[in-house]
Amino acid sequence: MPDYSVYVIAVYALATLVYGGITLSSWRAIKGIETRIAQQKNMPLEKKYH
Amino acid sequence: MGGVQPVLKAIYRLAWKDVMADFRHRSTFSSMLFFSVAVLLVFQAAFEPDPREAQRLVPGLLWTTVLFTTIMGLGRVFQSEEENGAFEGLMLAPLPRGAIFFGKWLGNLALSLMVMVMLVPLTLILFNVTLWSRVPMLLFLLFLGTMGLTALGVLLAAMTQTARSRETLLALLLLPLVSPLLIAGVQAMAVVITSGDLSGPWLNLLLIFDAIYLALAPWGFGWLVEE
Amino acid sequence: MKRLFALNRWLGWLTLSLLAAALWLVFTAPLDYQQGNSVRILYMHVPSAKMALFVYIALTVFSAWHLWKKSETADILAEASAPVGAAFALVTLVSGSIWGKPMWGTWWAWDARLTSMLVLLILYMGIIALRNGIDDPIKGGRATAILAIFGAIDLPIIHFSVSWWRTLHQPPSFGQASTGSTITGPLLPPLVWMSVAFIFLGTYLVILKAREIRGRRILENLETERTSHA
């Protein structure tokens, strides 16, 4: 029985990269977007409509 | 009963207008024809088939050429409306949306079929294949395939008409969706060439594909242009 | 929708613990006497494949819902589903390929399952590209929804025609090997756990993406509102 460990490691590394990547990029994006929304909402009116 | 005939007439007039306008100004037809010849040239240069090989390659060759050529024609289906801003006007016409779809489809189908009528003999000449007795059957199969192909294609053309880089997008969306049609068309044509037999499961699959897309594409078009 | 986002934090933890448990099972399970270590690839491959299809079904439902009820929530969920489904399809294809090399001796075979999965991935990419390509978000949402529904109609036809094509040309030698139906007995629990964990993972990712997309739309609205007043 040959050892297939290399193939197994490759698959799990790839899956971690893809699923982890999509999660992390989404987290980062959400963090950025939600801070900017909060900034927009808290901006005083005269500044907001300038 | 008076409802059906005016609609059919409108479909026909819409298609006729497109075909005539194309002959006069836009010349999609001639660019499609010469594009298809260019594709044949590329195939010849890439594969250099001898006549025996060429005979085996003819189905795939014809269908790929037809597919690429049709995509080129489909990219222009709504172009004149888009340029003149006439799309809204077309949508305001007192017609069911399905009829507008069928008009556009019929015009495009007519142009594609005219290209094919010239393409088939050209292919046989350029690749030195002597299959002249099978030409009507080959054309019939291409006709069947093109019905479904352009039905789906006109819908996708409408979908992508306002998009950026729409011709690339159209090809990207159309090619995977028509892959069953391509498989069925190539297989049915291979059967026709080897045995001269115009029947069998692949022909049925072509018909099923046509039926599904001719029934559903007008419906999708209606949803798409709804305000 | 906000309540859903709050719930998603818990869903995230649940997914993480389920995944940890499933992975522990995967790496402690007994080895298959025929396939050895390589059976562990299937524990990743099969759940990913199921989720790639499952997310597409969800995408179709969201699309139909959006067309029918003009619901923005459905539109956001549909937009969120596409990249998640594409990720599942990508992992399915690459892991299948890596599994195929030692098992079949080849990276790729044009059988019905692989071909449909490839078309599914292209379709996901097409859906994403179509939405990005259209500037008007309402038109883009509607066009994407219709495309998704047509894709759902087309996928079974593709699967059927390719399997028919292959069976007429050559016996389906690989057919069943990639489904996991050969996995039985002590090899089954890790697969079941991974499948369950992946259902949670898919749901979590779609909701997460939905939160991102909703935020992006709100932000765009706020910014256009601001510039129009200036």
Image: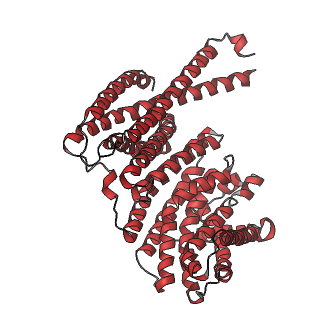
The vertical placement of B16 against C146, above or below, is below
Please tell me which residue lies in front, B178 or A43: B178
Q: Name the residue located 76 percent from the left edge and 20 percent from the top edge.
A: C230
The vertical placement of B70 against A40, above or below, is below
Q: Name the residue located 62 percent from the left edge and 41 percent from the top edge.
A: C132
Image quarter of residue C216 = top right
Please tell me which residue lies in front, A29 or A46: A29
Q: Decide if residue B184 is on the left or right side of residue C178.
A: right
Residue furthest left as drawn: C185
Q: Decide if residue B206 is on the left or right side of residue C196.
A: right
The vertical placement of B172 against B65, above or below, is above
Q: How is the image coloured?
A: secondary structure
Q: Decide if residue C4 is on the left or right side of residue C35.
A: right
Residue B224 image point, x, y percent: 57, 50
Q: Name the residue located 62 percent from the left edge and 11 percent from the top edge.
A: A42
Image quarter of residue C20 = top left
Q: Decide if residue A16 is on the left or right side of residue B16.
A: left
